[in-house]
Image (tube, rainbow, N blue to C red):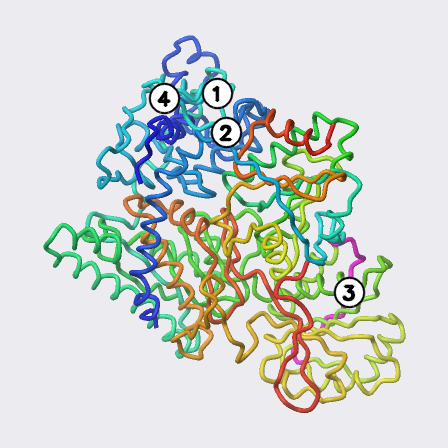
């Protein structure tokens, strides 16, 4: 019964080998490189996701929001890049202090099986998140639609990459940032998106 | 493939140094040694807490900076979150995290992947062996002994000498010797089953596991037959890790006899005589708890035991289950109801529970989830073994409690009782049952009851096409139509990857780390198996379905696979 799997192993292993070799060299290069910034237009699907309090959040509402919006894709048990992205959010909220709710920070789960409201709430607590930061989960189909809409689709969470999307209420387009930013770089980008 | 930029490679190396550095400082600073006296065990535990929880001995979080200027508490950036429990590191999100176990840190290394020097690159990265002092330095500053700077994703920790010593002490000990069950010639596994399980299920499990073991050992044989360098490289990459060339896999059968309270002693005896690296599968009558506790306390991984009655825990580490079993069905019903009845006002729920392991697990899953969602506990009526609810008693219960929802956690005896319920004047809005517990009897559900009976169904629906998400093609599994055979099939998929991944790092924690970092799986029985560090129940879903009108067996989905 394991034969079918064994039969497909050479291809799997070849792919693994390539990924591994890239992995060994790639990150070092990435670490030296600046993040990449572009302006994009997205059309969000009309899906309803659920936040850490179990409340429904309509994804499309992010497009029409009167406050600046920042979106990233993370998961609760991620080991490496999600903590860095989340610390960026936490630092911004700290800097804004009482004005933290003047920006809507949104983290969309890419592991909706495991990221229940309970798991997400505990995650946010670890980063001392204040109101204004929503961690969203939903059905696999809706999460896939959300990822596709932001041109961020990955079939599997383990192959994710750091992405931050920012939108000012005055602009139609989104600023898309690929890569990890320092705290000052992130705050500068949010300033450009209308977050003072 | 080579990086044109040596600096980036340095970044890679710096990671490993980081954690190890802490330990070194104390050893080299005489004034620290006598500030507090601790036993070596206390030092290790304190270092372990820093590594795993990011908390210092005094209970404060470690302090650190990432990306140059972002201050972070150590609790948000623990060592374990990137370097993982065994300290062998990972590749995730395009970031390579090198090993931080003493065995790696205190040796000079070439370019490494998961602890194995990469020899096919013409200019492999090198770093010298760390000393205690250079290790602490790299943890603090991110600069390695050769002046190379680590990636700025690696936190720079603000460490007092004394704390640094604790962490370094721990890192030196971390994954320093291969786990029991591994010798120069063998990696030993065992499967646990009780002598009273159905022979067909037991044989389905054993056949699947033994086929895996013999396939692997045959591959190693063919590896030994290769002659050219190119063939060897291909064989190494394609069939099995090169170390397995010299190590055979073995599978023992640990058969449990008598009552479950004697199992622990039997397991200890098996393990004392012939320790194993990990337990594979398993099948016992009743709860898995006794074997779970044996695994947990002896730190022996157990992969996918065939049980619907697992231990449900957020923190236990060593047993990886296919799902939470019956508990998960109760959980799914609570989530479904919570999502459906959103008024927030208390929804009166009556729960009728057969006093059995299955009934209790279903009720437990429902109650704990329902209460975590902020609802009042259900009214519970327990049925003893053999007891049935008469129409009169049911009528009285409905009259008294006026429930909108009735949960009926019972097996095959369910159907006549549902008929009684259906004939009463006062009716609940809906009735929930467990498809797995009701079993075949479920399909005898009369047509008039089908519209308001909801069924927890923890598997793919029968006959559904399975589409592989990456290739978008239909998958046809070549496996018998037997649940144990299908579960063993999933086990073999995961095990094949894990054995290949662990390479020359035969540490039990690394085996579990490797599985935790693996890709989601498309398997016959469940909609999806997914993994993650510390995640211990691979299938997280359960449909709520209804039987279609008529007297057929066709099911209609009323929910997604995972309900939030």
Q: Please tell me whether the stretch drawn in magenta is mainly helix, strand or loop.
A: loop
| Label 2 sits on residue | B50
Which residues make up the magenta segment? B372-386
Which labelled disc corresponds to residue B340? 3
Label 1 to label 3: alpha-carbon separation: 52 Å
- Marks 1 and 4 on same chain: yes
In the rendered image, the quadrant that contains the N terminus of chain A is bottom left
| Label 4 sits on residue | B148
Q: Please indicate, yes or no, whether residue A15 appears anywhere in the rendered image.
A: yes
Q: Residue at x 61, y 69 (%)?
A: B358
Between A21 and B380, the residue placed more toward the observer is A21
| Label 1 sits on residue | B163
Label 1 to label 4: alpha-carbon separation: 24 Å
- Marks 1 and 2 on same chain: yes
Is disc 3 in contact with disc 4, using a CB cutoff of under 8 Å? no
Q: Is residue B167 left or right of residue B130?
A: right
Q: Residue at x 42, y 56 (%)?
A: B302
Tell me which chain the residue with mark 1 is part of.
B
Q: Secondary structure at mark 1?
A: helix
Between B423 and B91, the residue placed more toward the observer is B91
Is disc 1 in contact with disc 2, using a CB cutoff of under 8 Å? yes
Number of numbered discs visible in the structure rendering = 4
> Quick check: B173 above or below B551?
above
């Amino acid at each position: 019964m394991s034969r079918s799997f064994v039969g497909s192993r050479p291809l799997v292993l070849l792919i693994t080998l390539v990924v591994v070799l890239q992995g060994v060299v790639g990150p070092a290069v990435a670490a030296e490189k600046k993040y990449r910034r572009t302006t994009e237009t997205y059309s969000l699907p009309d899906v309803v996701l659920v936040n850490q309090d179990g409340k429904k959040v309509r994804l499309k509402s992010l497009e029409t929001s009167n406050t600046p919006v920042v979106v990233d894709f993370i998961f609760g048990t991620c080991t490496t890049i999600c903590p860095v992205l989340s610390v960026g959010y936490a630092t911004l909220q700290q800097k804004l202090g009482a004005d933290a709710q003047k920006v809507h920070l949104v983290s969309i789960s890419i592991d909706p099986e495991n990221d229940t409201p309970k798991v997400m709430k505990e995650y946010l607590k670890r980063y001392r998140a204040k109101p204004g930061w929503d961690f969203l989960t939903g059905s696999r189909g809706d999460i896939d639609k959300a990822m596709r809409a932001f041109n961020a689709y990955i079939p599997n969470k383990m192959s994710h990459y750091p992405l931050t999307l920012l939108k000012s209420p005055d602009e139609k387009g989104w600023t898309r940032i690929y890569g990890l930013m320092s705290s000052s770089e992130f705050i500068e980008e949010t300033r450009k998106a209308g977050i003072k | 493939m080579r990086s044109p930029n040596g600096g980036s490679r340095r970044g890679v190396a710096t990671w490993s140094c980081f954690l190890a550095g802490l330990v070194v400082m104390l050893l080299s600073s005489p004034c620290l040694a006598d500030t507090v006296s601790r036993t070596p065990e206390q030092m290790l535990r304190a270092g372990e807490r820093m590594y795993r929880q990011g908390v210092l001995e005094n209970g404060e979080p470690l302090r650190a900076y990432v990306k140059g200027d972002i201050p972070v508490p150590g609790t948000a950036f623990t060592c374990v979150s990137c370097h993982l429990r065994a300290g062998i590191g990972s590749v995730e999100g395009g970031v390579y995290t090198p090993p931080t176990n003493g065995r790696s840190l205190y040796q000079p290394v070439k370019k490494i992947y998961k602890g194995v020097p990469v020899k096919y690159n013409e200019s492999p990265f090198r770093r010298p062996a760390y000393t205690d002092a250079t290790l602490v330095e790299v943890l603090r500053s991110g600069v390695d002994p050769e002046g190379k700077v680590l990636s700025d994703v690696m936190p720079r920790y603000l460490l007092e000498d004394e704390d640094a010593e604790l962490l370094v002490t721990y890192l030196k000990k971390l994954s320093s010797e291969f786990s029991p069950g591994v010798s120069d010639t063998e990696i030993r596994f065992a499967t646990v089953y009780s002598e009273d399980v159905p022979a067909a299920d037991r044989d389905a499990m054993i056949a699947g596991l033994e086929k895996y073991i013999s396939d692997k050992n045959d591959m190693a044989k063919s590896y030994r037959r290769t002659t050219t360098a190119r063939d060897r490289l291909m064989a190494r990459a394609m069939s099995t890790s090169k170390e397995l060339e010299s190590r055979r896999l073995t599978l023992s059968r640990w058969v449990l006899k008598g009552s479950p309270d004697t199992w622990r002693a039997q397991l200890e005896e098996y393990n004392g005589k012939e320790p194993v690296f990990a337990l594979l599968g398993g099948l016992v009558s009743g709860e898995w708890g006794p074997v779970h506790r044996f695994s947990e306390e002896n730190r022996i991984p157990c992969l996918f035991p065939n049980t619907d009655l697992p231990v449900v825990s957020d923190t236990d580490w060593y047993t990886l289950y296919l799902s939470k079993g019956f508990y998960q069905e109760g959980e799914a019903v609570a989530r479904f109801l919570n999502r459906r009845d959103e008024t927030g006002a208390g929804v009166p729920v009556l729960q009728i529970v057969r006093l059995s392991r299955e009934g209790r697990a279903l009720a437990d899953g429902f109650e704990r989830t329902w209460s975590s969602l902020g609802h009042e506990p259900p009214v519970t009526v327990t049925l003893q073994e053999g007891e049935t609810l008469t129409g009169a008693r049911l009528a009285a219960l409905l009259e008294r409690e006026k429930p909108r929802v009735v949960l009926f956690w019972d097996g095959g005896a369910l159907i006549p009782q549902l008929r009684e319920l259906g004939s009463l004047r006062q009716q609940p809005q809906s009735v929930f049952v467990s498809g797995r517990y009701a079993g075949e009897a479920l399909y005898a559900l009369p047509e008039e009851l089908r519209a308001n009976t909801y069924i927890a169904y923890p598997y793919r629906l029968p006959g559904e096409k399975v589409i592989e998400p990456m290739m978008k093609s239909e998958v046809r599994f070549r496996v018998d139509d037997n649940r144990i055979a299908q579960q063993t099939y999933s086990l073999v998929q995961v095990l094949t990857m894990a054995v290949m991944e662990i390479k020359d790092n035969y540490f039990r924690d690394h085996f579990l780390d490797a599985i935790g970092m693996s890709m989601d799986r498309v398997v016959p029985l469940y909609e999806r198996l997914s993994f993650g560090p510390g995640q211990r129940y691979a299938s997280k879903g359960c449909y709520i379905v209804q039987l279609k009108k008529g007297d057929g067996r066709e099911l209609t989905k009323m929910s997604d696979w995972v309900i939030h």
